[in-house]
Image: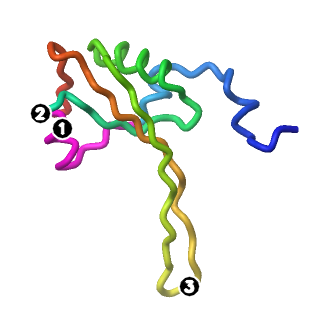
Amino acid sequence: MPKNKDITLTNLKLEPYQIILRPIVTEKGYHRAEHQNTYYFEVHQLANKAQIKDAVEFLFDVKVLNVRTQHRKGKTVYFRRKNRKGKRRDWKKAIVKLHSESKINYF
């Protein structure tokens, strides 16, 4: 059995609405959307760059130039009254650069 459990699940067929979980709307992200036409999304952990590109193009009807991804580790959280600590879940972030003629409106 492979050490990395994700290797066995890479041929999983995901629908576009399963790949793009939510947009990440922050001040930095809004600035980059306005000036660099770059958008941030939380995506499924098993999705690759090609699947993310296809999903964004399908869901938002835009032309994607580039996709970059980051695996974000969940932070450690301390519970005050229970005197123990836990951990938030790990997640994957996609940074999607669009063609200059394309835009995504969040609001």
Residue tagged by mark 1? 32
Spatial CA span between label 2 and label 3: 44 Å
Looking at the rendered image, the disc whose residue lies closer to the viewer, 2 or 3, is 2
Identify residue type, mark 1.
Arg
Q: Is residue 40 left or right of residue 53?
A: left
Bin the neighbour count of mark 2 within 10 Å (Cα to Cα): few under 14, some 14-19, many 20 and up.
few
Cβ–Cβ under 8 Å for marks 1 and 2: yes
Residue tagged by mark 2? 34
**SS for tag 2?**
helix
Image quadrant for the C terminus? top left
Give residue 82's mark: 3
Pointer 3 or 1: first along the chain: 1
Q: Is residue 11 left or right of residue 36?
A: right
Q: Is residue 98 left or right of residue 31?
A: right
Name above or below for residue 90 compared with residue 69: below
Query: Is 9 contained in the magenta span?
Result: no
Q: Is residue 30 left or right of residue 67?
A: left
Asked where in the image residue 83 lies, by quadrant, the reply is: bottom right
Spatial CA span between label 3 and label 1: 41 Å
| Part of the protein shown in magenta | 22-33
